[in-house]
Amino acid sequence: MAGQNFERHVLYDTGADFFELNGNSTMKFTPKGAKELCEEATKRNIFIGRIECGNWSVSGFCPDGNMTWDSKSDLVAAGKIKENNDLAIENINEDASEGYNAFLFTLPY
């Protein structure tokens, strides 16, 4: 990927920004943006590898080290991108319902 074009201290609300701004795992997303990122990754045939959630405040992102979602290796091995990424969206919904409001992604490019 080319050099990053995003701001590290911004909480993004649009999933496509990850791809348009040459994002990486330091880019943070709202629950809405996180779900959109999963949908956009599916359209691009890219697996969601890992999601870390936490909380966003005026001081920035505070991760919760206990709240990490990893791709499902059996789905990755079978090439089932949509199924894997749909599970990622379900996880985001669960985490958001518990009050988490910011998400970091790892995509295996």
Image (spheres, helix red, strand yellow):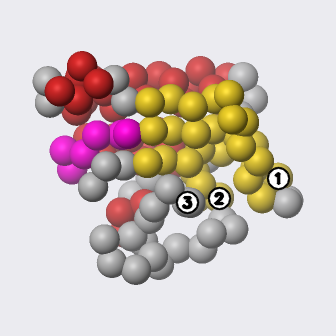
Give me the disc on residue 57.
1
Q: Position of residue 22 (x, y in %)?
A: 39, 70
Q: Where is residue 68 in the image (x, y as percent from the top left)?
A: 57, 31
Give the amino acid at mark 2: Leu
Residue at 72% across, 36% down: 64
**Looking at the image, is mark 3 or mark 1 earlier in the sequence?**
3
Q: Quadrant of residue 23?
A: bottom left
Mark 3 falls on what kind of element? loop
Give the amino acid at mark 1: Ser
Residue at 47% across, 22% down: 90
Q: Where is residue 27 in the image (x, y as percent from the top left)?
A: 55, 60
Give me the disc on residue 27.
3
The answer to whether residue 48 is magenta is yes
Mark in the foreground, 2 or 3: 3
Return the residue at label 2.
11
Residue at 59% across, 55% down: 28
